[in-house]
Image: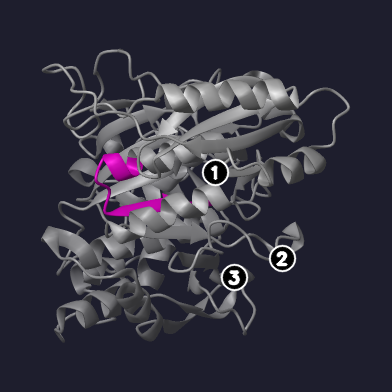
């Protein structure tokens, strides 16, 4: 089914709609259409929907919306390949395949003028924002022996002031939706962190074998259980893991998503009452996805998105083109004039599938760090608007010296102290947890990060 709490909920009629493999391989042949959908309320039978997903009734497709979809197929010689009613927007969303040799732009232009059509757009493609240049350099196969030997290698925690911030907050009770690939939910460092799983990708790789989502989840919420493994920025937060992207190759971080799978995951995050949504991905502006994010913002959800690299050619990129989304860039890659939040993004030690650990780079990791810091601000039921969160993060940013030079970065310690109006969160390392570079000898380098 679409969502699974913990590790085992039953399969039922809420199984998400799927797209054919061709839509992933060649999205240019497909168009996304929405039509108005106001069905009569359908009362769910007792225990027929998972808690937090279906509510008192299941949002269904009205007869009128179905008839409209059929008439559009007939009139424009389209073929529906998948469809799904979006409850938040009160529309029925349809993915159609264009007739061969038909120009997509001309079909979209004609549909835009059709009064039966609520919206129409391309089936856009998006990619995760991880740097694969490190692949072939390192891989840590197993959990370490001894207490916290990997902590010295988590230089980003020191640069972000995370250990000091943990004196005041560890993100308790904050629900974070990670919209990404799947996650290795069996990884020992994620034990007890994942409360919901959802898979919106047809024919994707096994959920728990996906690298990018596992990396992101580790940065946000790894627990270093028993003092072993690595430590996340918000180790007491709870994760809602929603797979909307699929790896482009086996055992690599690079992954792709599209408008349809992301729309399903964004709606699922709303339904699951996420406090924060992490989007470590980027792509072209997408009106449908932007509408879902704006709806979620009105419900109080804070969205954190990745800034694409300059060479991508994306000027107004989703999701950071949506006003109110916290855009995050790797500090090492940012220019002095960057208008985005900055965080360390190079050589971040995190989790990979199979209970292993590895280094990774890219704005995907910087985005996850900021998501974790936002969770520290919202812990224990605290609420604040996204604009205030961004203001706190910006004014509490600090200059720091790193192997990459002097950089500006958000700072968890200063941000939490600002939000709580306290002065006892010092930037200096606490003596009991001061990082020592000698721990580097615990790493056996064999294979690289994706």
Foreground of the two, 146 or 335: 335
Name the residue: 62% across, 55% down.
Answer: 285
Camera-nearest label, 1 or 2:
1
Name the residue: 84% across, 36% down.
Answer: 103
Please provide the residue range marked out in magenta: 269-281
Q: Position of residue 188 (x, y in %)?
A: 29, 33
Left or right position of 172 against 251 = left
- Label 3 packing within 10 angstroms: few (<14), some (14-19), many (20+): many
Residue denoted by label 3: 332
Q: Quadrant of the C terminus?
A: top right
Q: Position of residue 271 (x, y in %)?
A: 28, 40
Label 1 or label 3, whichever comes before in sequence order: 1
Residue denoted by label 1: 118
Image position of 88 with respect to 23: above or below: below
The numbered disc on residue 310 is 2
The residue most toward the right is 101
């Amino acid at each position: 089914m679409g969502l699974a709490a913990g590790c085992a909920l039953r399969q039922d009629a809420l199984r998400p709609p799927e797209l054919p493999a061709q839509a992933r391989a060649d999205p240019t042949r497909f168009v996304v259409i929405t039509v108005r959908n106001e069905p009569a309320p359908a009362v769910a039978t007792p225990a027929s929907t998972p808690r937090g997903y279906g509510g008192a009734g299941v949002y269904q497709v009205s007869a009128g919306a179905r008839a409209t979809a059929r008439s559009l197929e007939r009139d424009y010689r389209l073929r529906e390949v998948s469809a799904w009613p979006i409850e938040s927007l009160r529309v029925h969303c349809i993915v159609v395949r264009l007739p061969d040799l038909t120009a997509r732009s001309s079909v979209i232009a004609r549909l835009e003028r059709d009064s039966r059509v609520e919206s129409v757009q391309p089936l856009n493609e998006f990619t995760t924002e991880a740097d694969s240049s490190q692949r072939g350099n390192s891989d840590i196969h197993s959990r370490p022996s001894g207490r916290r030997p990997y902590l010295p290698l988590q230089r980003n925690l020191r640069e972000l002031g995370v250990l000091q911030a943990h004196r005041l907050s560890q993100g308790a009770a904050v629900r974070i939706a990670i919209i990404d690939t799947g996650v290795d939910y069996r990884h020992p460092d994620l034990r007890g962190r994942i409360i919901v799983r959802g898979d919106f990708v047809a024919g994707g790789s096994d959920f728990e074998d996906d690298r990018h989502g596992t990396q992101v989840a580790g940065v946000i919420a790894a627990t270093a259980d028993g003092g072993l493994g690595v430590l996340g920025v918000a180790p007491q937060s709870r994760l809602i893991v929603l797979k909307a992207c699929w790896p482009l190759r086996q055992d690599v971080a690079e992954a792709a998503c599209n408008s349809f799978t992301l729309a399903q995951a964004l709606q699922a995050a709303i339904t699951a009452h996420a406090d924060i949504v992490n989007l470590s991905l980027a792509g072209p502006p997408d009106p449908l996805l932007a509408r879902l994010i704006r709806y979620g913002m009105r419900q109080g959800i804070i969205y954190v998105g990745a800034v694409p690299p300059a060479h991508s050619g994306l000027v107004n990129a989703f999701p950071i083109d949506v006003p109110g989304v916290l855009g995050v860039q790797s500090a090492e890659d940012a220019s002095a004039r960057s208008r985005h939040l900055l965080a360390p993004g190079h050589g971040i030690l995190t989790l990979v599938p199979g209970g292993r650990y590895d280094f990774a780079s890219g704005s995907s990791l910087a985005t996850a760090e900021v998501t974790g810091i936002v969770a520290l601000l919202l812990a224990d039921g605290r609420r604040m608007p996204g604009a205030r969160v961004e203001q706190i993060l910006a004014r509490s940013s600090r200059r720091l010296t790193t192997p990459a030079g002097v950089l500006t970065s958000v700072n968890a310690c200063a941000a939490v102290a600002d939000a709580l109006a306290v002065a006892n969160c010092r930037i200096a390392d606490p003596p009991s947890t001061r990082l020592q570079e000698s721990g580097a000898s615990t790493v056996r380098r064999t294979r690289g990060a994706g």
